[in-house]
Amino acid sequence: MENSIRVRFAPSPTGLLHVGNARTALFNFFFACKKGGTFILRLEDTDMERSSAEAEEAILNDLKWLGIDWDEGPGQPGERGPYRQSERLETYRRYAGELLKKGEAYRCYCTPEELEEKKKRSLARGIPPKYDGRCRNLSAEEERSFSAAGRPASLRFKVEARTVEFQDLVKGKVSFDGQGIGDFIILRSDGVASYNFAVVVDDALMEITQVIRGEDHLANTPRQLLLYKTLGFLPPQFAHLPLIVGPDRAPLSKRHGTTAVAHFREEGYLAEALVNYLALLGWSSEDAEEIFSLEKLIGKFSLGRVSRSSAIFNYEKLKWINRTHMKGLSGEKRLELAWPFLKKKGINVNNVDGSWLNTALETVGKEVDNLNQLADHLTVFFEDGWKMDPEAQDLLQKEEGRRVLKGLIDELGKVEEITPENYKLIIFSLAKRAGLSGRGLYMPLRAALTGKMRGPELEKVFVLLGKEKTLKRIEAALAQAE
Ligand code: GLU
């Protein structure tokens, strides 16, 4: 029998994919993969003004980059499509029309200004705003006169509820006071369905079995459940994921730092590390393990281990997870991932010896947080990247610094090449010759060879540059510091 589990991720293509939405996508994807179900991607693009084709493309790219692919959705036709709400407007109108016919919905002629005014009045009196039902019982004559006056009509759903209760797969039993829910719009006066209406029609027709989404949608759920009932659809199960917040407990926003998946990618985070980190925002494995591949996450995931409390986005932890994934990369993969970052820094590695490059990447890879830094640190091995920081320059103006560099020229005269084997001896003799040790010895060397005060292990820098380049840099550094 075909597995009947069907879940969906339903982004609105109005901007870049936020990590919170990416986490929702991932949890749906893990759930579907683990259960052998179907994962559907649906674009909620009924807000024509804010939605764009570019945003849609960017979201699809980000999902693919994260390793998420969908069984049904844009580019993956299925029987229950189309998968863009803008292509389903007729369907929503048909269902809304039926509710109107059955007396479950009515035409509302209130203007946005009138509604705004009422809302303000309620707020001023400290009452939560709720539609007052002004148009609920209009006489045929009143309707005619509104219509004749050219007032556009929206359709409102009649809410007749005391309490709405449901069993959330994460939050447990949830209960809402139906009295607080006013008659709400299902079809706007321009004929476009509202979010709550379109989402119910779609989830029902697409036979979604579990709606897994952010807790910010919790307050929409009672409205949606009322619609399910009136439309005669069987509701799905709901799982509301805890909010992702910043250290100040406010919903994660740009104020806290990077929030878009695309920006994390540009900063040089690995997709697998970001996926790993996002999975830990509100979910944990029973053995408290924290480093996972995508496949492993699919195997381990369960909604039962999703927490009810908000998840704090911790940038430091993400860095640690990224470093850990970077350390686990094979040489080939590291190069493949670093390539675009090297290109961006203007480093051409086409004619560079493969094993040299591999060692160089491995060396700098040990101390960086991301691929951007990796490329940045690698630049020191290339001519174009050798630029003196002012701090390094200052250091080399000092007599001790110059003594170290001159001493190194003499020491290098004694060897054919710098190797991991003779490096210690070179340094040992240099220390004796210059009468310096520790930072006094190493910092001028680092400053001259890399132009910077921090960077990869000095021994590796020496060996990777080789004798010829090392001498060239020492001489150039001495000349610059004259
Ligand atoms: N389009 C909604 C959003 O981007 C998703 C709504 C839902 O999952 O029900 O937040």
Image: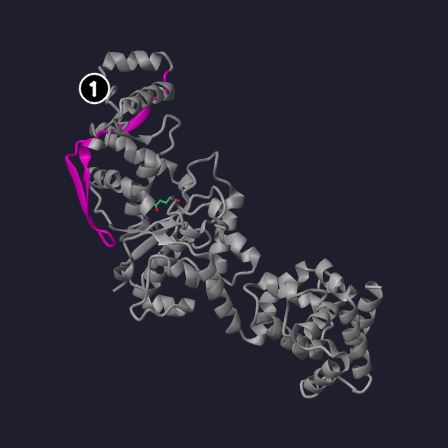
Quarter location, residue 469: bottom right
Q: Where is ligand 1, by quadrant?
A: top left
Q: Magenta segment range? A: 151-179
**Left or right: 69 with respect to 393?**
left
The quadrant in which the N terminus is found is bottom left
Q: Is residue 166 magenta?
A: yes
Viewer can see residue 272: no
Residue 402 x %, y %: 79, 71
Q: Nearer the viewer, residue 48 or 344?
A: 344
**Left or right: 257 with respect to 462?**
left
Name the residue at 26% across, 27% down: 130
Q: Is residue 393 magenta?
A: no
Q: Nearer the viewer, residue 368 or 432?
A: 432
**Secondary structure type for disc 1:** loop
Residue 413 x %, y %: 82, 84
Residue 348 x %, y %: 72, 66
Q: Badge 1 local density, few (<14 within 10 Å), some, or many (20+)?
A: few
Q: How is the image coloured?
A: one colour
- The residue pinned by badge 1 equals 137
**Left or right: 247 with respect to 342?**
left
